[in-house]
Image (cartoon, rainbow, N blue to C red):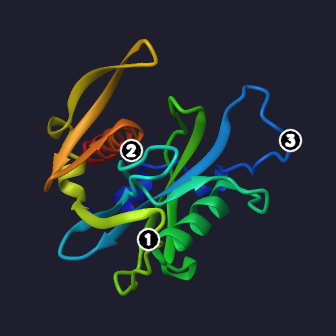
Amino acid sequence: MKREQIIQCLEPASSLQGWSQQQRKDGLRNAAVLIPLVERDQWQVLLTKRTEHLNNHAGQVSFPGGRADSIDLSPLQTALRETEEEVGIQQDLIEVAGIIEPFLTVTNFKVVPIVGFVEPSFTLNIDEFEVADVFEVPLSILADQSCYERKEVVWKGQNRMYWELMYDGFQIWGATAAMLYAFADRLRVAKNT
């Protein structure tokens, strides 16, 4: 898939609004993640596995990113800052391609997923407190919606449906898999136009 096709399927980054400094009336907390695309022999998506001792989403596969800090004026600042803090990819090595629709998590975050092209020459500098592992998955696998399985879990007394994808021993599920599935849907539509 060409870079232009990926950009075409996304909302423009210029449509991003800044974070409001007031507390959200809906009780949700602001967060942003980077969906990092690395062009090697084929497009790869960089993912992290969170450490087991974290309060939220411990041990889960995720994108670099996280909760908005008071210094962050926008989702873009949050995603880029968190990416540099967690895995050491410097902001000047990331070209923002666009965004996909925000995602609401069961832990009360409103997450803005930002897609970015990462210069392949990056060097990882992992924050070992937050990140247990970093790995790449071919975009061709993540873009194939037949690779995802719909599952159900009881969480806090309620049945919850989620997407799951297994890759090289890693369980990609929950919010990360849902955002990847939405991205895959956009890629599928762009490919067919």
Q: Nearer the viewer, residue 104 or 134?
A: 134
Determine whether 150 is above or below 139 in the image.
Answer: above
Q: Determine crowd level at label 3: few under 14, some 14-19, many 20+ residues with C-alpha closer than 10 A.
A: few
* Amino acid under disc 1: Glu
Determine whether 12 is above or below 184 in the image.
Answer: below
Q: Which mark is in front, 1 or 3?
A: 1
Q: Position of residue 159 (x, y in %)?
A: 37, 13
Secondary element at tag 3: loop
Q: Earlier in the sequence, mark 1 or mark 2?
A: 1
Disc marking residue 128: 1
In the figure, residue 51 lies in which quadrant?
Answer: bottom left
Secondary element at tag 1: loop
Q: Determine crowd level at label 2: few under 14, some 14-19, many 20+ residues with C-alpha closer than 10 A.
A: many
Which residue is depicted at the point 78% across and 63% down? Answer: 71
* Amino acid under disc 2: Thr
Q: Nearer the viewer, residue 174 or 41?
A: 174
* Amino acid under disc 3: Gln
Which residue is depicted at the point 47% across and 50% down? Answer: 10
In 3D space, how far apart are the residues under numbered discs 1 and 3 (Cα atoms)? Answer: 32 Å
Q: Position of residue 113 (x, y in %)?
A: 51, 49
Determine whether 118 is above or below 48 in the image.
Answer: below
Q: Position of residue 47 (x, y in %)?
A: 34, 60
Secondary element at tag 2: helix
Disc marking residue 22: 3
- Compared across the picture, whether 147 is left or right of 136 comes to left
Which residue is depicted at the point 66% across and 44% down? Answer: 30
Residue designated by label 2: 176
Q: Position of residue 93 (x, y in %)?
A: 49, 81
Q: Quadrant of the N terminus?
A: bottom left
